[in-house]
Image (cartoon, rainbow, N blue to C red):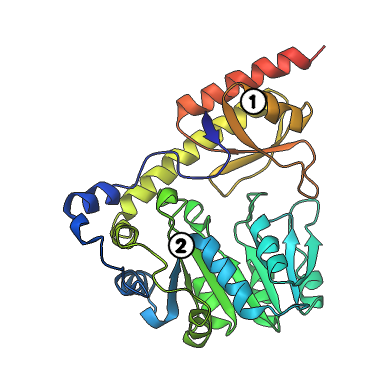
Amino acid sequence: MVLLNDNANLFGVNPAVAEVADKFDFSRLWAYPSENSDVLRSKIGSEFGVSPDEVIVGNGSDELLDMTSKCFIDPGDKFCSPSPTFGMYRFYARVNLATICEKPLRPDFSMDADAILAERAKLTALCQPNNPTANLFDRRDVVRVLSESPGVVVLDEAYADFCGSNMLADAMAAPLTIDIRTFSKAYGLAGLRAGFAIARKEVVDELRRVRTPFGLNSFTEAVAARALDHRSWVRETVSRMKVERAYLDGRLKALGFRTYVSECNFLVAKSPVNGPALVAALRDRGVAVRDCNSFLMMDDHIRVTIGPRPMMDRFLAEVEAIIEDVRP
């Protein structure tokens, strides 16, 4: 199965994995890891110019989203986000019995900051750039939500490495904003599950109250810390991804798809044939892409993770064959 559905970095494993494995003392795995991943937090603090006390790590960014909802939502509290966006924000809010309030994006996938702020939510989540629409929201709109929201704001920058966006300074200027990052995307470590969040110390202290100890295993922590040294590898894979993204965009347009500007390592396109049927037919042929039909405004849309040229050509060949089968 060619997996083009989960937005991992398909251009290889971060070299940090082999480097750490070569020297890692696996005979020490009988011992518990660091309770708060102190080495990794210190390394992240140095990388991003913040104190380790302003950093918290988790088992992927998903654990950090879970942690945030547990910490700041009581039953009945209002949760708000744009829609469509990453579905796990809503999931964790619902698990913690929040009242869900989602505000539709405009037809061009831009965000209505006024509508979001009008809800005065206890917890708000923004994905910058946004998944699944792949676009960056207007920075001024994001800053308004960060600075004017009465509650806590999650700023998810999981895909920021693919477009050079960085709103950490804006997040730290807002007292109740949590900037969430991950090693699962550009850093190529999705299988090791490591994420981190940066916020003011008083916010991080609150998150630690609901965090389970030993969130990261020893090997994952060591690899994640080492991966921060491989900026050139990240830049190289991002550059390769952009070349293949442009290639895929052109080929899909030629097949009758409507594509959208992407700031991420995936492309969103409206299919010229029934979207769910196309996704199912691709899966039968050994290619997995994301069916976006369940998202607001995205009927017959698919999301395709960008990978090396052989993967893109395999996907395109199967798509072309399927379309030829269903067209008169």
Q: Which mark is residue 59?
A: 2
Q: Position of residue 284 (x, y in %)?
A: 63, 23
**Where 237 falls versus 326 (above or below)?**
below
Query: Which of the 4 image quadrants contains residue 277?
Result: top right
Q: Position of residue 173 (x, y in %)?
A: 54, 82
Give 73 or 239, whichever is nearer the viewer.
Answer: 73
User: What amino acid does circle 2 point to?
Assistant: Asn
Closer to the N terminus: mark 2 or mark 1?
Answer: 2
Q: Residue furthest bottom?
A: 202
Please tell me whether mark 2 or mark 1 is closer to you in this view: 2
Q: Is residue 175 visible?
A: yes
- In the structure shown, which secondary structural element does the residue marked by tag 2 occupy? loop
Q: Which residue is mark 1?
A: 282
Query: Which of the 4 image quadrants contains residue 113?
Result: bottom right
Judge the density around disc 1: few (<14), some (14-19), many (≥20) Cα neighbours within 10 Å.
many
User: What amino acid does circle 1 point to?
Assistant: Leu
Q: Position of residue 215 (x, y in %)?
A: 42, 67
Q: Is residue 157 visible?
A: no
The residue that appears at 17% across and 54% down in the rendered structure is 23
Judge the density around disc 2: few (<14), some (14-19), many (≥20) Cα neighbours within 10 Å.
some
Q: Is residue 318 left or right of residue 37?
A: right
The residue that appears at 61% across and 75% down in the rendered structure is 70
| Residues at marks 2 and 1, CA–CA distance in whole angstroms | 31 Å
Q: Position of residue 208 (x, y in %)?
A: 48, 80
Q: Is residue 131 left or right of residue 233?
A: right
